[in-house]
Image: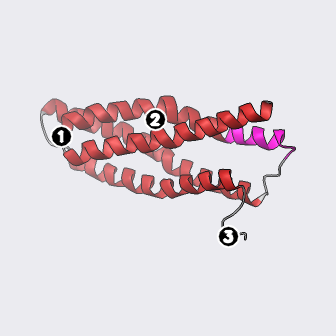
Amino acid sequence: MDYLIVKWLHVLSSTVLFGTGIGSAFYLLLATLGRDARAVATVSRYVVVTDWVFTATAAVFQPLGGFWLMHLAGGIPWTTPWIAWSLALYAFAIACWLPVLWIQLRLRDLSAQAAGAGSALPAAYWRLFRWWVALGCAAFPAFVAIFYLMVAKRLPFAG
């Protein structure tokens, strides 16, 4: 019974991690492309809160839940290929996401300043936004691959 509960929590937290990440990115992308500093300031403020409350919580639980599942399943080794790849992809995705946290804080502040001044989003906003998009585009396929590995429990090229 412990295994099923931990597995359910692991799947739920992965859904929260992926879903809030995609949802937040989608809303900030659309708001930014609309170029309305007031809308961007509002959306970016919510994106920052969402990332800290939901995404960060799930990001911490994911490896802990996975390690717990490995233990409950009889001590599956970390060197099991699908687990090793999942961990490497997760480390890569989190390495992309950590700077995104800082970037989102700056995007929030820059858009709030522009909205307060009634001006357009500044060049610094657009420079950071390009980094935000690039890091998100790099992390996205890693998360998709991790989902595959969690479900299939084997490498796609392992035959």
* Residue that appears at 43% across and 45% down: 22
Against 48, residue 35 (above or below) is below
- Give amino acid for label 3: Phe
Say left or right for 130 vs 135. Answer: left
What whole-number distance in Å separates the C-alpha atoms at marks 2 and 1?
22 Å
Check disc 1 and report the residue beneath it.
36
Determine contact: label 2, label 1, CB under 8 Å: no
Check disc 3 and report the residue beneath it.
157
What whole-number distance in Å separates the C-alpha atoms at marks 3 and 2?
33 Å
The first of marks 2 and 1 along the sequence is: 1
- Give amino acid for label 1: Asp
The first of marks 3 and 2 along the sequence is: 2
User: Which colouring convention does the figure follow?
Assistant: secondary structure
Which of the labelled discs sits on residue 143, or is there none?
A: none
Which of the labelled discs sits on residue 51, or is there none?
A: 2
Q: Is residue 67 magenta?
A: yes
Q: Bounds of the magenta span? A: 63-75
